[in-house]
Amino acid sequence: MKIFLDTANLDELKKGARLGVVDGVTTNPSLIAKEGRPLDEQVRMICDIVDGDISAEVVSTEAKGMVREGRKLAAIHKNIVVKAPLTRDGIEATAALSKDGIRVNVTLCFSPTQALLAAKAGAYIVSPFVGRLDDIGAVGMDLIRDIMRIYSNYGFKTQVLTASVRSPVHVIEASLAGSHIATMPYKVLDQLFNHPLTDKGLDQFLKDWAKVFQETPVTG
Ligand code: E4P
């Protein structure tokens, strides 16, 4: 499963990129607004940090505007994936952009029927939001399992990106479901490393090592 970082923050992206396990980045208008720089400048800087798919979202609400914006975004860098919302206009724009060879990530997907439409429109990626479904008392991960099954029934090539990930459990469940990608905040990526037995084991190894090689005086 590919790991994407769900942030537009350059410091977090640099820290993540250093780890060598980050395959791409997702942004959305809220994440870009938090950083305060114009979208094109911010995504250009992101492309310099992470070498992989970088999703940048359109903000128009009608298809024509989305297509116009999508073309401009795609021209910024070869790694840009245009993000469009799962609305009627968003799907129309996805079909038009995909026909032109521009890769589209259809976002704000909350149901299997929406995911089916994204695949039919030729989306490169669909982004079902598991955390926001959990927030309203649904089981977000059921949506990932349903979409994986529907796509496999018909051989759709659209990649399933588990979005709105809030915890390591979401990451485990996404990978068990066969999700192609999971995007997560830096905090969740960092949590994936943690295990008390790793800390305890390493501590013991280093103490045993030090007893023989650092605390015993060298003779002869
Ligand atoms: C996905 O691409 C979205 O940016 C993101 O995962 C939304 O997550 P949130 O529900 O935590 O805002």
Image: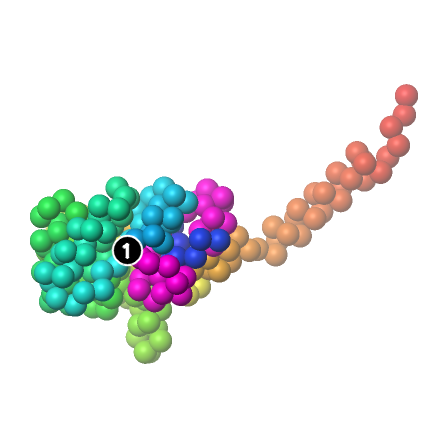
Q: Nearer the viewer, residue 27 or 191?
A: 27
Left or right position of 13 against 154? right
Task: Work out whether residue 88 or residue 36 is closer to the camera in this orientation and state it.
Answer: 36
Can see residue 178?
no
In the rendered view of the protein, which quadrant contains the C terminus? Answer: top right
Q: Is residue 1 left or right of residue 97?
A: right
Query: Residue 193's x, y, as percent?
Result: 52, 52
Q: Is residue 201 above or below residue 147?
A: above
Q: Is residue 138 above or below residue 170?
A: below
Q: Is residue 125 left or right of residue 14?
A: left
Residue type for callout 1: Ala
Question: Compared with residue 130, is residue 180 higher up or lower down, i.e. above or below?
Answer: above
Residue in the image at 10% along x and 61% along y: 64
Residue highlighted by disc 1: 56
Name the residue rendered at 75%, 38% in the picture.
209
Farthest right residue in view: 220
Q: Residue furthest bottom?
A: 136
Estimate how packed mark 1 is, as few (under 14), some (14 to 19) or many (20 or more) residues with alpha carbons within 10 Å. many
- Name which quarter of the figure residue 6 lies in: bottom left
Which colouring convention does the figure follow? rainbow
In the rendered structure, the answer to whether residue 120 lies left or right of residue 205 reads: left
Q: Position of residue 191 (x, y in %)?
A: 51, 58
Magenta region: 12-39
